[in-house]
Image: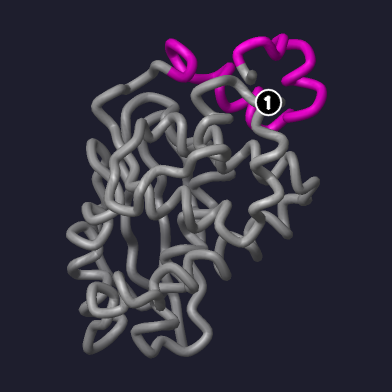
Amino acid sequence: MGGAVTPSLIGAKLPRMAAYVGGLPGGLSAHPSCLAKGALVRSIVGDRPELARRAGELPRDVGRLLEEPPLAGEWIPEAHFVALFHAVSDLLQLDDAAVLVRARSRNRALFESPAYRILMAVLSPGSLLRFAGKRWDNFHRGTFLEMAGASDDGVRVVLRFPQRLFDRMILLAFGQAFAAALELSGARSPDVLLERVEAEAGHYRAVWG
């Protein structure tokens, strides 16, 4: 099983995941109070069931998510979810641009699913951003998304989290998820720009036509 995989082998075959886990204070056991919903796991692996055969290449806790994805309403450690996100990108040999394209399409599919279509339905992009924190809370616990203000050059939101729980690539992927949600709210050509990354925050600017 994945527990027998050596760190050097993981680093060679799964560079994104290894870099992420290596930067976490305490590794995969970091920040146990921060959780992610099982629906997110199912979203990123559901269209590639063949990945389950490669679970043995991953650390045990991450590989188990490939072999036996949690129920959609189940909560799992956020660090395990982020590690899995990176591992899937590594296993599929995606470059950074492809990772973000996939993140947007998979999140749009999740938001359009029967379970979440009503949750994501809003009157306008502005309404979506005003209540973005509540929608974030449907998928994450222990981390916080808040609107930080609006100006002529866009609407700013901040994602706050414990130290290094989220790295730059997952923050960029979350930006694509936010853009997918804006599309569903009727925004024209939305873009969510990651303007600044800190150890405990990601700062975004959302724009649309």
- Identify the image quadrant of the N terminus: top right
Instruction: Estimate the x, y position of residue 205 in percent, counting from the top left.
Output: 42, 63
The image quadrant of residue 90 is top right
Left or right: 87 as drawn, with respect to 13: left
Inspect the image, locate mark 1, and give the three-letter code of the amino acid beneath it.
Gly
Depicted 165 relative to depicted 44: above or below: above
Magenta span contains residue 9: yes
Characterize the magenta stretch by its predominant secondary structure. helix
Q: Residue at x 44, y 27 (%)?
A: 164
Q: Residue at x 32, y 22 (%)?
A: 31
Q: Residue at x 29, y 44 (%)?
A: 74
Task: Give the class, few, some or many, for how many residues have Cα within 10 Å of label 1's Cα (few <14, many ≥20).
Answer: some
Q: How is the image coloured?
A: one colour
Instruction: Estimate the x, y position of residue 163 in percent, counting from the top left.
Output: 37, 24
User: 150 and 95: which one is in front?
Assistant: 95
Q: Residue at x 81, y 22 (%)?
A: 12
Depicted 58 relative to depicted 132: above or below: above
Instruction: Estimate the x, y position of residue 146 in percent, counting from the top left.
Output: 23, 54
The image quadrant of residue 169 is top right
**Which residue corresponds to mark 1?**
56
Q: Secondary structure at mark 1?
A: helix
Which region is colored magenta?
A: 3-28
User: 55 and 18: which one is in front?
Assistant: 55
Magenta span contains residue 134: no
Instruction: Estimate the x, y position of residue 147 in percent, counting from the top left.
Output: 24, 60
Left or right: 3 as drawn, with respect to 155: right
Depicted 168 relative to depicted 5: above or below: below
